[in-house]
Image (cartoon, rainbow, N blue to C red):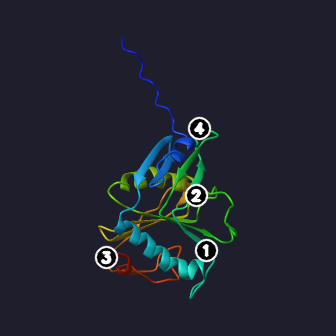
Amino acid sequence: MGQAAEKPRRATYADLEAAPPNKVAELIHGVLHVMPRPAPRHARVASRLGAKLGSPFDLGDGGPGGWQILIEPEIHFPDPASPGDVEVLVPDLAGWRVERMPELPEAAYFSLAPDWICEVLSSSTEKVDREEKMPIYAREGVRHAWLVDPIQRTLEVHVLAHRRTWGPAATYHDNARVRVEPFETLELDLSVLWAR
């Protein structure tokens, strides 16, 4: 008879800290995911979306304000499979309503779940973003999640439903002009995201 397979070692925060500085590292279900920095098209979409939302919602410039919107924040959630450990996610963009987070934390990470996240999909991250991170965001009570695909030129808008599951997604394409939660006071012209 063969020996029983060894149980794989769960990755720790120390493993995440040891990742090369030119990579994005996340810790999900005890597995370390190390990905390359975003490709130029991916980074441009995230930057443009951050600028379009940041001015009216974070700065209050021509808009309602009331948000803290950040690029690639490190967010720590408790790991339900291993009490005392954390899951570490780094969305492309995240936002907190000021009434929930009036000031940024002093630590280099956030332990308060955002009100909104945005993941910009790529071939190397889409599976993890959809299948692993989205359920964690729902479990932790993130109310709004956007998935942006710069190749397909789509925006998927997800809103948390009862029992911490995502309701049906609304998908917008190409050059649509949309008003979507939680930033529905702004008409967002999607063509700005794809323009070269």
Q: Say which label, 1 or 3, has the lower sequence index.
A: 1
Q: Say which label, 4 or 2, has the lower sequence index.
A: 4
Q: Residue at x 58, y 65 (%)?
A: 115
Give the Cα separation between the discs numbered 3 and 4: 42 Å
Q: Nearer the viewer, residue 91 or 159?
A: 91
Which amino acid type is shown beneath numbered disc 1?
A: Trp
Q: From the top left corner, tell me how far across and down residue 173 is, in percent.
A: 33, 74
Instruction: Please say whether residue 148 is visible from this viewpoint.
Output: yes
Given contact means CB atoms under 8 Å apart, are the residues at marks 1 and 4 in contact?
no
Q: From the top left corner, tell me how far across and down residue 143 is, in percent.
A: 55, 64
Q: Which residue corresponds to mark 3?
A: 174
**Mark in the foreground, 2 or 1:** 1
Which amino acid type is shown beneath numbered disc 2?
A: Gly
Q: Secondary structure at mark 1?
A: strand
Q: Nearer the viewer, residue 160 or 54?
A: 54
Q: Say which label, 2 or 3, has the lower sequence index.
A: 2
Q: Are there few (<14), some (14-19), or many (20+) residues within 10 Å of tag 4?
A: few
Q: Which residue corresponds to mark 1?
A: 67
Residue extending farthest left: 152
